[in-house]
Image (tube, grey):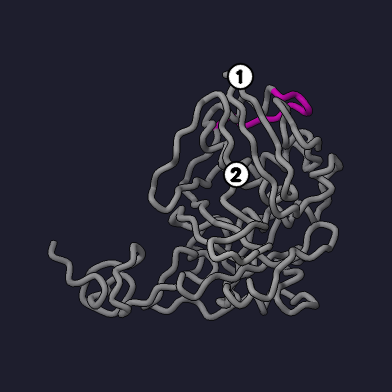
């Protein structure tokens, strides 16, 4: 793929294939993104440039978290009707994109972030002359990003990356992503990042492009009844982020990488997938009893997340 792609279907040119790419985008089409404060800055309609908040950059405290990512995708039940691609014909992509350009832009923003290396962008101009620029970051699919057909491994890694960015609340939260790209090169993860994001979270694997599904496992004990987190898909209740399938402990389905910091591959239904592993900050697991009523907690009589008297009080109505 050229560094700048204008008015051409990224899926058509990707090598993922039209049908498989539809499957992936249909899954991704059930995702929406919302910032922490629930608002989105408006930009001039002529040029809308929006990239994922970070990876491979400087964090507010000055540490370089090379594997760092932000999640903000949430399942919301939306689907695109009439999504179709006609080979290399850009009309199919344009028609799909313009059914719901805001949601489609989110899908493509995360897809390019996962697949394309940092420092590169992909551009699309719609029929109204509005230009969208999507920034690469993790570079998990180097063959696809350079214009070659995506390998099966790249399909699996991009699928895992999209899944890792999902949470049910649509909030932006920092998390650390470990693994290798489609050519087996490690995602750079300095020791400072592993120390800062010391809470092991989950493993993500599957293949959206072949309709084999997407799976998540927990890399630590599941959340207790008095615990909650914005990042609920891996450590939360079973199938809390359906259609993502919770498989239980990562250790029961996956093999660790030689570095010991991530899972190299996971097996499900007799198929072995390249996997990605996530870590989060300990503060992003909330506990009923810390005297802070988090948005994941509710009032009531008890010491549970759903009825946390100490943090949220007794319900008055």
User: Residue pushed farthest top?
Assistant: 128
* Quadrant of the snapshot with the N terminus: top right
Seen from the viewer's position, the closer of residues 308 and 194 is 194
Rendered view: 277 above or below 166? below
- Left or right: 105 in relation to 178: left
- State left or right for residue 167 relative to residue 149: left
Region in magenta: 81-90
Whole-percent x and y of residue 118? Answer: 72, 50
Label 1 to label 2: alpha-carbon separation: 21 Å
Disc 1 or 2, which lies upstream in sequence?
A: 2
The quadrant where residue 261 appears: bottom right
| Residue position marked by numbered label 1 in the rendering | 127
Whether residue 271 is visible here, answered yes or no, is no
Q: Which residue is mark 2?
A: 51
Residue ID at (52%, 64%)? 233
Q: Is residue 212 magenta?
A: no
């Amino acid at each position: 793929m050229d560094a700048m792609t204008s008015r051409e279907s990224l899926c058509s040119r990707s090598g993922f294939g039209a049908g498989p790419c539809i499957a992936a985008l249909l899954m991704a089409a059930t995702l929406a993104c919302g910032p922490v404060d629930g608002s989105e800055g408006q930009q001039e309609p002529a040029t809308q440039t929006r990239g994922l908040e970070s990876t491979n950059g400087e964090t507010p405290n000055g540490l370089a978290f090379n594997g760092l990512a932000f999640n903000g995708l949430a399942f919301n039940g939306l689907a695109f009707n009439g999504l179709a691609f006609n080979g290399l014909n850009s009309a199919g992509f344009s028609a799909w994109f313009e059914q719901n350009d805001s949601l489609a832009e989110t899908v493509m923003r995360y897809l390019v972030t996962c697949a394309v290396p940092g420092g590169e962008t992909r551009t699309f101009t719609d029929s109204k002359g509005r230009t969208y620029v999507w920034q690469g970051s993790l570079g998990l699919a180097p063959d696809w990003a350079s214009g070659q057909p995506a390998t099966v491994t790249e399909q699996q890694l991009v699928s895992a990356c999209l899944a890792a960015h999902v949470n049910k609340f649509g909030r932006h939260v920092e998390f650390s992503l470990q693994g290798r790209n489609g050519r087996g090169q490690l995602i750079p993860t300095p020791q400072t990042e592993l120390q800062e994001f010391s809470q092991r979270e989950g493993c993500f694997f599957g293949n959206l492009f072949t309709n084999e599904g997407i799976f998540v496992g927990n890399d630590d004990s599941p959340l207790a009844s008095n615990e909650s987190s914005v990042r609920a898909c891996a450590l939360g209740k079973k199938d809390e982020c359906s259609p993502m399938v919770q498989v239980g402990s990562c250790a029961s389905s996956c093999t660790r990488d030689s570095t010991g910091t991530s899972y190299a591959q996971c097996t499900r239904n007799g198929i072995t997938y390249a996997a990605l592993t996530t870590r989060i900050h300990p503060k992003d697991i909330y506990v009923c009893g810390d005297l802070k009523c988090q948005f994941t907690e509710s009032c009531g009589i008890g010491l549970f997340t759903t009825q946390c008297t100490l943090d949220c009080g007794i319900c008055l109505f």
